[in-house]
Amino acid sequence: MSSTPPLERDASYWQALPGPAQAAGNPPPPAADYVIIGGGLAGISTARSILDLAPGASVAVLESHAIGHGASGRNGGLISPLPVPVWLLTARTDNDHAWALKTLNARVHALGRALHAQIPAAEAADTQLTLHAMGRITGAGLDTVARALDAAGIVHDLRLDAQRHGLRTLALPASCVNPFALVNALAGEARTRGALICTAAPVASVAQDGVGTRVLLGSGQVIKAGCVIVCTNAYTGALGVPEGARQAKPVRNYMLATAPLDPAHVQQLGDGRRFVVEIDKSYVFYRLHQGRLVYGGIESFKEVPGSDFAVPDDILGRLTHLVHRSLGRDCPPIARVWSGRYHATATETPIIMRHPKAPAIVMNVGYGGTGVALTQIFSGLAAAIATGRPQSDPDLERLGRILQETRVPIRGLISFGASAARQLLLGPRAPAA
């Protein structure tokens, strides 16, 4: 009688895949023009953008563990075509938000094409973001989202899904990547261009020191820097940063990967060409990678003791139940489970700003659940602030201004709810021919 192999819990699915060994990190320098704290997509992308704006500058990236240890190595790998969902609530009445949705959507597609052409290791591929309404109420919500996409001029397909008893499905073109491979490939490029990538270098605190900064490492070493860019996202709370910056909260996310799927399940899931989001009171997402299901979506603000990858038994039970709901009880066994933390503001828009009480510190955090796209697109904003160089991209400058001005849209929430309720009462609108 064969026994079920034990669950793997020591790394995410992406981090456990075979691949080239990570290069040894550099020792932290005694001083640098720019010190970036955090070796995820935000930190590495910012390092590359600073080197674009200030060639020859000394740039050091300090990572407490290994490159991609946090959210950048533990997510689903979607380059979301709707990376700032809050603007969907206001796009029909706010021209700036409609323009920003459309502009970011175009940049996301350009990013996917660039990664496919320039960084093969990232495994960037075209996919379809497929949003499944799991009931009439969420179906009415998708109707309202589609109207916002109409206002922004974003290509989409809203239809009644005959295979799901006539429930609504909204689909948009998108891209997927192997996120851990991506961040490590970008780190390799940054190293080639002169950045020092310092791993196993936890930071205890950072403080303004005259016109520059003083970075204290956990080892007791002090680094003098002209400017520090904080890119620690959900780990920011453990870093001694002066108080006074805009706040974000760490959110814990739980994911799993199955054993290889049989051909019937692979076909059911679109042969790897779809990234599915089921919209219900239990929000879940899933995709295929190398014939395995990568699945997640349970989120919690609750801290979990033990390993940073820990998945409590009750969470595992809920995840298993959701997988069975999505694929049926005959799906392959779960092979690996893990948790990760991402950083979310009230509007799920990032914090990209000079620290109000310490001007030599720049905050570049709060990327929410769409950070794979946003960290790369907005790294130029953080780099421009850090270097004091003028922003040469007027659209990016405008996007940054709209980000800064975005607030929780109370009126938009009310309008969205009213529109969804109206659609629920009147019935779904007819899909476009």
Image (tube, grey):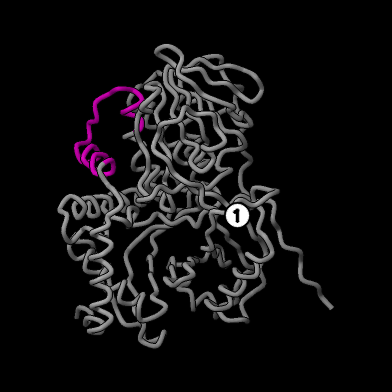
Q: Visible in this render: residue 202? A: yes
Residue that carries the numbered disc 1 in the rendered image: 339
* Residue 236 higher or lower than 153, as above or below: above
Residue at the image point whose x is 17% and y is 54% from the top: 94
Decide if residue 37 is on the left or right side of residue 173. Answer: right
Residue 338 sits in which quadrant? Answer: bottom right
Residue range (magenta): 382-404
Tell which of 166 and 129 is nearer to you.
Answer: 166
Residue 418 sits in which quadrant? Answer: bottom left
Give percent across and percent down for residue 151.
17, 62
Q: Label 1 is placed on what type of residue?
A: Ser
Considering the image in quadrants, where does the C terminus appear?
bottom left
Decide if residue 56 is on the left or right side of residue 398. Answer: right
Q: Secondary structure at mark 1?
A: strand
Residue at the image point whose x is 39% and y is 88% from the top: 165
Residue at the image point whose x is 36% and y is 75% from the top: 138
Give percent across and percent down for residue 230.
46, 31
Give percent across and percent down for residue 143.
27, 74
* Residue 346 higher or lower than 335, as above or below: above
Q: Visible in this render: residue 191? A: no
In this view, the residue farthest toward the right is 1
**How packed is label 1: few (under 14 Cα within 10 Å), some, or many (20 or more)?**
many
Decide if residue 151 is on the left or right side of residue 240. Answer: left
**Would residue 357 be counted in the magenta stretch?**
no
